[in-house]
Image: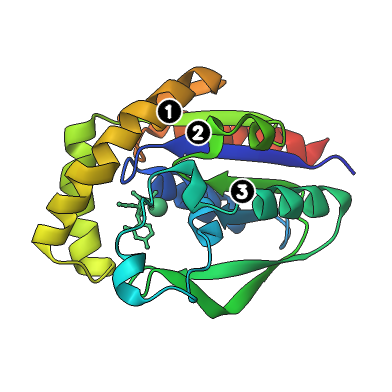
Amino acid sequence: MTRTIIAIAGASASGKSLFTQTIYNELVNELESGAIAIIEEDAYYKDQSHLPFEHRTQTNYDHPDAFEHDLLRTHLEQLRKGNAVEVPTYDYAQHTRSDTTRTVTPAKILIIEGILLLSDPALSEEFDIKVFIDTPLDICLLRRMQRDIEQRGRSLPSVVEQYQATVRPMFYQFIEPSKHNADLVVTRGGMNRVAIDIIKSKIKYLLQE
Ligand code: UZR
Ligand code: MG
């Protein structure tokens, strides 16, 4: 069976998860169960449970080294071979992996979304379709402030500090240049209706093959 791995990359809070979830939610009822699976790159942030909490807050989470991309790559290879994998769960409040894992079964279509997927050449080789969500950075910042305070247990000063220290500089160093590795660039973000429909049609086409 041919399996297709679709990568959705772009800045933090650019709308990657929304874009991915919208495609999934709109397709899931029409398709056989297990036809599509989603994995987040964020789940592969390194385990830091051996470090004191104060050290964990100092990590540069916007740098490729913060991720265990090798494990992600191994998992993608396993899924492509038809084997299920145990995807880690990440706890943003504790800045480390949780004890639980999530079993992902080998779907025909696998969508993976995350900030630095296209910045790693070895990892990029695993992707059949590479999409970059190109949302203006000021919009990302506004969304990020709201999301991290409401959903990831952060204070406004910590969001502002992190944005200046790592989010913005690492965007320009790693994420923005990776746009050129994409097959498709989606402007505006997660609510680009035309782009959602195009990816949905492609998925349906692949599932009929
Ligand atoms: P998305 N991140 C944290 O803030 N804390 C962590 O423990 C792990 C990750 C942030 C990370 C990055 N950066 O910008 C964002 N910082 O999660 C990526 N600073 O997640 O693509 O969902 O925005
Ligand atoms: Mg997200």
| Amino acid marked by disc 1 | Val
**Structural distance between the alpha carbons of marks 2 and 3:** 30 Å
Quadrant in which the N terminus appears: top right
Percent position (x, y) of residue 75?
73, 55
Q: Which residue is depicted at the point 48% across and 76% down?
A: 49
**Residue corresponding to mark 1:** 194
Contact between marks 2 and 1 (CB within 8 A): the answer is: yes
**Residue corresponding to mark 3:** 69
Task: Identify whether 208 is placed above or below 57.
Answer: above
Percent position (x, y) of residue 167?
28, 43
Q: Is residue 107 left or right of residue 21?
A: right
Q: Is mark 3 within 8 Å of ligand 1?
A: no
Quadrant in which the C terminus appears: top right
Q: Which residue is depicted at the point 24% across and 40% down?
A: 140
**Structural distance between the alpha carbons of marks 2 and 1:** 5 Å
Element class at badge 2:
helix
| Amino acid marked by disc 3 | His
Viewer-proximal residue among 91 and 16? 91
Q: Which residue is depicted at the point 54% across and 23% down?
A: 182
Q: Which residue is depicted at the point 48% across and 25% down?
A: 178
Task: Identify whether 156 is placed above or below 202.
Answer: below
Contact between marks 2 and 3 (CB within 8 A): the answer is: no
Which residue is at the far bottom?
Answer: 99
Quarter of the image for residue 51 reads bottom left
Element class at badge 1:
helix
Earlier residue among tags 2 and 3: 3
**Residue corresponding to mark 2:** 197
Quarter of the image for residue 127 reads top right
Q: Which mark is residue 89?
A: none
